[in-house]
Image (tube, rainbow, N blue to C red):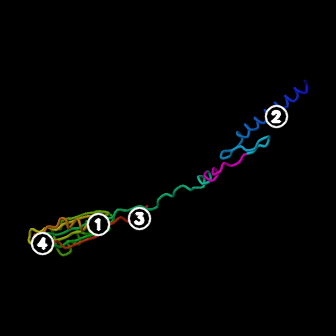
Amino acid sequence: MKRKMYWLAVALLVQSGLFAGTAAAEGNCPPGMYPIGGQGVRGCAPIPGAQRGAAAQQAAPPPAAPTTRWGTRWGAIVASAATSDAGAATGRLTKSDALSEAMAKCRRNGATDCKVMAEYSNQCVAWVVPDGGDAKALGGLGEGATPELALQKAQSYCENRAGNGCKVAYSACSLPEIEPI
């Protein structure tokens, strides 16, 4: 009977030691690892793919702060009805710079009635005038993302009963430019 009790006690100790060892192995494994072993052999092994993902997240540098931006560029068209003089400016940093330059060009031959026809930024502009025709013919101004779109819009305003259409008087773009911050 003593012998039976002895083996029963040994069996219980072995059994409880294995279960305790397994539980301890699970609790002792670091993140990204899982317990391995059995029958008294305990250890931790890496979870496939867990280390690569963690290392990649830790190694990725923060995004760099931008050092440039898109800067607005202005253009203007100014014309005199009395003398047909005109002036234009493109690619200026401010609207007032574009208007001042265009106005000065219009007045360089003595025109005193120069008026702003168009002021624009970050796009293209086209000005068409009647090609012959009568005094009631109308030209047009158009803007667009490309010179072709601006010209197409300007031509849509052209009215010339003589049938000659309109010809391009001016076409230019003042597109945004990359500048340092």
Mark 4 vs mark 1: which is more N-terminal?
A: 1
**Residue at 71% of width from left, 48% of height from top?**
45
- In the image, is 3 to the left or to the right of 130? right
Q: What residue did someone put label 1 on?
A: 124
Q: Secondary structure at mark 2?
A: helix
Stretch in magenta: 44-53
Judge whether residue 48 is colored magenta: yes
| Camera-nearest label, 3 or 4 | 4
Q: Residues within 10 Å of mark 3 (few under 14, many from 20)?
A: few
Q: Residues within 10 Å of mark 1 (few under 14, many from 20)?
A: many
Q: Secondary structure at mark 3?
A: strand
Q: What residue did someone put label 3 on?
A: 179
Q: What residue did someone put label 2 on?
A: 14
- In the image, is 23 to the left or to the right of 76? right
Mark 1 vs mark 3: which is more N-terminal?
A: 1
Q: Compute the Cα span from label 3 to label 4.
A: 46 Å
**Residue at 33% of width from left, 64% of height from top?**
73
- Cβ–Cβ below 8 Å for labels 2 and 1? no
Q: Compute the Cα span from label 1 to label 3.
A: 20 Å
Question: In the image, which disc is placed on residue 78?
Answer: none
Identity, as a three-letter code, of the amino acid under mark 1: Cys
**Residue at 32% of width from left, 68% of height from top?**
91
Q: What residue did someone put label 4 on?
A: 163
Q: Secondary structure at mark 4?
A: loop
Q: Compute the Cα span from label 4 to label 1.
A: 27 Å
Mark 3 vs mark 4: which is more N-terminal?
A: 4
Q: Where 39 falls versus 7 (above or below)?
A: below
| Camera-nearest label, 4 or 2 | 2
